Image (cartoon, rainbow, N blue to C red):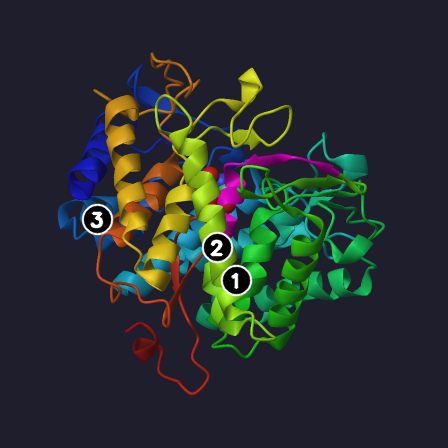
Amino acid sequence: VFLQMMKHAWDNYKRYAWGLNELKPISKQGHSSNLFGNIQGATIVDALDTLYIMEMKEEFKEAKEWVEKNLDFNVNAEISVFEVNIRFVGGLLSAYYLSGEEVFRKKAVELGEKLLPAFNTPTGIPWALLNIKSGIGRNWPWASGGSSILAEFGTLHLEFVHLSHLSGNPVFAEKVMNIRKVLNRLDKPEGLYPNYLNPSSGQWGQHHVSIGGLGDSFYEYLLKAWLMSDKTDEEGKKMYYEAVQAIETHLIRKSSGGLTYIAEWKGGLLEHKMGHLTCFAGGMFGLGADGAPNDKTGHHIELGAEIARTCHESYDRTSMKLGPEAFRFDGGVEAIATRQNEKYYILRPEVIETYMYMWRLTHDPKYRQWGWEAVEALEKHCRVDGGYSGIRDVYNNHESHDDVQQSFFLSETLKYLYLLFSEDDLLPFEHWVFNTEAHPLPVLHKDDGNKEENQK
Ligand code: DMJ
């Protein structure tokens, strides 16, 4: 069924939007997001490794040919450094490591070089936006006092370490190690990392803390940097477990109905709201359980399981059995969206991602059951003639489609579903870490000079 879902998403993208960034499955035409400027082909690059893993050989071949002939970074484009890194650099790196095809390595390094001018700031904390032709960067106009965003500059580490590894050029790794240095010099309120940091002054912006949007994958990359280094990156490890400690103390709460959730922190006050994005944290806590200090392995697994349960409830309490963008634990509700503009579902992967990690770590069959419920809901409500679409209100009985097939549906949602129902030896966690767009990157084994061996 997953192959057939992937084929439906891919074939329609190919038919109606080939070479463009994303597909509009209702109007059956291309969709361009300004996140990628006029770099093209986001869906192709994001889908490469999923096609490879699902052994869709023909499709992988046509995707590779498109990359060879058409993927072009010599364009006048202002792009999101974070989005281009996780989807394009990450997608190309995984395609290279899985297939061994040189074109993917070459393109990844070429794109990495284009991103380097983003780091030309007084502190070396990169800009959010970069014109890849002129090399001029800036930040999102809405971000607190000209700040860069934690989840953006904190989600370059894995890809940049691999770029140095594959190019022999240390500059990429140096840039991301410097980000850590800046962070470690700063005082952290209650041990927490605010979402905003000014790249010129090196000071925090607003003291907002989130494990969802604006913060999320920064924490994920601390843990995965340590795992990807074959557990030699002690600094990443320390930063991760200390951050989790502060998160537990200040952000994690239990509702009166017994659901564990992760709130948002605004200058010391809690907002009792959890985003769909925050649901990835269940899988992260599970993945990090093994290395947890002070005999806390069982506790971290338990935390992962509780977050998975809460996020499943957020799905189960809707009419479509798909989760809202954000849900609240206040005003008499639990795990339910209360504001109209938080009721949408845009094919996001985080809840299924957590099911996949918790399944591999515990083999509790409920995770496969919950994953299957999501498959049924996707097929019933999101599948349309022209592909898969997001939904505007998951509490409604009638679908109002948003007409976008996000590229992460192919790279993440379908891949995590496939892995949830595969054997554990497909991309085993001892040898692979997934970037935040679900692109697998090999662990760089310390005792292993032989690159080929890393990939097994
Ligand atoms: C993806 O691009 C990545 O998973 C990112 O970390 C968060 N947002 C989307 C999916 O929801």
The residue mark sitting in front, 2 or 3, is 2
Residue 6 lies within the magenta run:
no
Residue at 66% across, 53% down: 247
Q: Which residue is mark 2?
A: 304
Seen from the viewer's position, the closer of residues 32 and 109 is 32
Seen from the viewer's position, the closer of residues 58 and 158 is 158
Name above or below for residue 418 compared with residue 395. Answer: below
Residue at 56% across, 75% down: 295
- In the rendered image, residue 226, in percent from the top left (x then y), is placed at 54, 70
* Mark 2 or 3, nearer chain start: 3
Name above or below for residue 95 compared with residue 215. Answer: below
Amino acid of disc 1: His
Q: Quadrant of the N terminus?
A: top left
* Mark 3 or 1, nearer chain start: 3
Q: Which residues are magenta?
A: 270-282
Residue 300 marker: 1
